[in-house]
Image: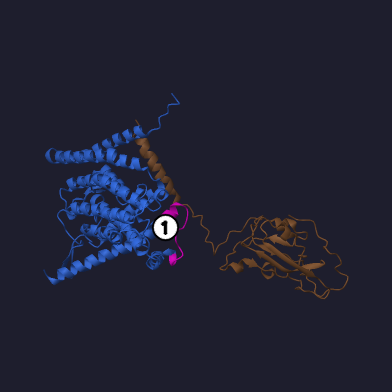
Chain colours: A blue, B brown
């Protein structure tokens, strides 16, 4: 173990943690601004030019707020729960590579924190830990609404994790590896010199399932059941205030960044982009832009769709997304075998068959949900 | 069998919200920009003056009587030719409105025989203390118009003999 390596890890870990925390602060501003523009408003613009100091003002406010602990709360778990929620949200992105390796001043620098050969599995396991924090926060508050929020959250996250995991599987199958770095490398290059070899092209429906399942996974609208204001006041964080609330809030937004980074890596080519092999410093810029666009997608969906009913949420997860993603895994596997054994052109079977299956799924869901017009008959 | 339509419907919803992003914001940057109020807006009361600077209020306290919230307190005193405040027999030596009580109904405006009290366009009525909610006459009365003299004025005896001054037809 040489000293330089330890220093490199320390610096990279520190920088990445800072990027995530600063990103969290500015994501709140980004979301408020984007939502405001969609609603024909201008958003926060008082603290500093264009409101860029707003996150600092919010942070100062939250730090100086009084911290209340309910009298009959489980004090230890009540204090630990926010920490338990934040830590997985921050460490989950450790395996995401944010640029190609390059030599700088004769030193070989890798732009990732950890290179685990089961990177995707690591992401899945850490993502599952995050639910503990939310459930324990809800339970230890000794508040019915918080408890309901925590329960809903756990049920929802466990249900959607299956579809999420299966959508990961198609990316793993296409790359032939669970290493994040291999998955990114497999997405380099172009078909016909202009279509990037991103997995979103090969597996558009898998990407769609990933995007839907992540919305449920990070408790974002329209799947924000655990904190449905109209039903549960604020859900699992009803009793939290001050810095503890800030931690829960931070976990939520950091998870959004993390899940966008993972999505960009698995399906949107990671740090790949034009000229990235010639200028390695373009890699972090590309992945940053992709994360921003995916985050905008989340905000956009929040501004558009109303919250769906809880039973429909579960029904959608178990009866639609799970069978669909299983079918997609099967199609991906068959397509890869066909491409390997018969003709590499046959890889086009994967997107075509996926679209067909998704069309069938849409038709079936539409038939189930269609209003029965008895009156007309 | 509807396959494309459900997806198109979702996409149309998304397109609607995305399109709104490129609309001009409707926000008015309030403390810097203010929207003019409508002509019949009922804001804070203003006590009017005549062109020569005399107060229109003759201290009759009909406004206080008409007030459903009992927000107005009027105390009247006699005018003299040495110290003349209003063209009538008396004037309001104390005129107070409790802005916490006032419901901005405009009954005082209707009750006033000389059109002295008018609900103006001022709506920024915040204060930090209960006692500040009582607006005295000095805050309510409008400034002396150009060419007029401040009250009390010294007037020629026999100029103002009516107890209620003659008034023009209502304009509103």
Q: Is residue B4 visible?
A: yes
Q: Is residue B37 above or below residue A164?
A: below
Residue plotted at (80% across, 67% down) = B90
> x, y (%) of residue B48?
73, 65
Figure label count: 1
> x, y (%) of residue A267?
25, 49
Apparent side of residue B150 relative to residue A73 in the rendered image (left or right): right
Mark 1 neighbour class, 10 Å CA radius: few under 14, some 14 to 19, many 20 or more: some
Secondary element type, mark 1: helix
| Residue A38 lies in the magenta-colored region | yes
Rendered-image quadrant of the C terminus of chain B: bottom right
Apparent side of residue B120 relative to residue A194 in the rendered image (left or right): right
> x, y (%) of residue A10?
20, 68
Residue plotted at (57% across, 67% down) = B127
Residue that numbered label 1 is attached to: A33
- Of residues A371 and A274, which is closer to you in this image? A371
- Of residues A335 and B92, which is closer to you in this image? B92
Q: Is residue A264 visible?
A: no
Q: Chain of mark 1?
A: A
> x, y (%) of residue A61?
40, 66
Q: Residue furthest front?
A: A72
Residue plotted at (45% across, 63% down) = A45
Q: Residue furthest right?
A: B158
Rendered-image quadrant of the N terminus of chain B: top left
Res B153 quadrant in image = bottom right
Q: Is residue A168 above or below residue A94?
A: above
- Of residues A362 and A148, which is closer to you in this image? A148
Apparent side of residue A99 relative to residue B34 in the rendered image (left or right): left
The magenta region covers A32-49
Residue plotted at (24% across, 41% down) = A325
Q: Residue furthest top?
A: A377
Q: Is residue A31 above or below residue A326?
A: below
């Amino acid at each position: 173990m040489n000293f330089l390596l330890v220093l490199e890890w320390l610096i990279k870990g520190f920088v990445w943690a800072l990027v995530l925390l600063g990103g969290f602060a500015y994501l709140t501003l980004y979301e408020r601004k984007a939502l405001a523009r969609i609603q024909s408003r201008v958003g926060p613009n008082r603290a500093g030019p264009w409101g860029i100091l707003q996150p600092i003002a919010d942070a100062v406010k939250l730090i100086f707020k009084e911290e209340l602990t309910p009298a009959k709360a489980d004090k230890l778990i009540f204090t630990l729960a926010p920490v338990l929620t934040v830590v997985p949200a921050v460490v989950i992105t450790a395996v995401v590579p944010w640029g190609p390796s390059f030599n700088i001043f004769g030193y070989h620098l890798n732009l990732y924190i950890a290179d685990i050969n089961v990177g995707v599995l690591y992401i899945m396991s850490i993502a599952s830990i995050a639910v503990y924090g939310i459930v324990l926060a809800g339970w230890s508050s000794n508040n019915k609404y918080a408890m309901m929020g925590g329960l809903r959250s756990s049920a929802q996250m466990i249900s959607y994790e299956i579809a999420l995991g299966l959508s990961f599987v198609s990316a793993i199958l296409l790359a032939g590896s669970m290493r994040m770095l291999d998955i990114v490398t497999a997405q380099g290059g172009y078909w016909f010199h202009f279509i990037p070899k991103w997995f979103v092209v090969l597996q558009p429906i898998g990407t769609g399932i990933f995007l839907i399942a992540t919305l449920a996974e990070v408790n974002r609208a329209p799947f924000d059941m655990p904190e449905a204001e109209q039903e549960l006041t604020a859900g699992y964080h009803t009793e939290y205030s001050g810095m503890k609330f800030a931690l829960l809030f931070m976990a939520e937004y950091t998870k959004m960044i993390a899940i966008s980074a993972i999505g960009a890596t698995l399906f949107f080519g990671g740090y790949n982009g034009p000229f990235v092999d010639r200028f390695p410093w373009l890699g972090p810029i590309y992945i940053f832009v992709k994360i921003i666009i995916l985050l905008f997608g989340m905000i956009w969906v929040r501004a558009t769709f109303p919250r769906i009913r809880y039973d429909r949420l579960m029904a959608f997860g178990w009866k639609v997304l799970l069978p669909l993603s299983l079918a997609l895994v099967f199609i991906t596997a068959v397509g890869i075998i066909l491409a390997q054994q018969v003709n590499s052109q046959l890889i086009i079977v994967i997107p075509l068959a996926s679209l067909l299956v998704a069309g069938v799924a849409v038709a079936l869901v539409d038939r189930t949900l269609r209003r029965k017009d008895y009156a007309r008959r | 069998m509807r396959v494309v339509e459900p997806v198109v419907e979702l996409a149309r919803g998304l397109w609607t919200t995305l399109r709104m992003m490129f609309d001009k914001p409707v926000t008015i940057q309030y403390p810097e920009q203010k929207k003019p109020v409508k002509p019949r807006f009922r804001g804070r009361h203003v006590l009017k003056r005549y062109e020569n600077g005399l107060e229109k209020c003759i201290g009759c306290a009909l406004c206080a009587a008409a007030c459903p919230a009992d927000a107005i307190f009027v105390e009247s005193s006699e005018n003299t030719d040495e110290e003349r405040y209003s063209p009538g027999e008396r004037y309001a030596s104390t005129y107070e409105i409790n802005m916490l009580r006032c419901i901005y109904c405009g009954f005082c405006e209707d009750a006033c025989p000389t059109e002295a009290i008018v609900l103006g366009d001022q709506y920024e009525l915040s204060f930090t203390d209960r006692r500040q909610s009582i607006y005295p006459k000095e805050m309510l009365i409008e400034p002396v118009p150009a060419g007029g003299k401040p009250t009390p004025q010294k007037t020629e005896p026999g100029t103002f003999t009516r107890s209620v001054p003659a008034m023009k037809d209502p304009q509103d």
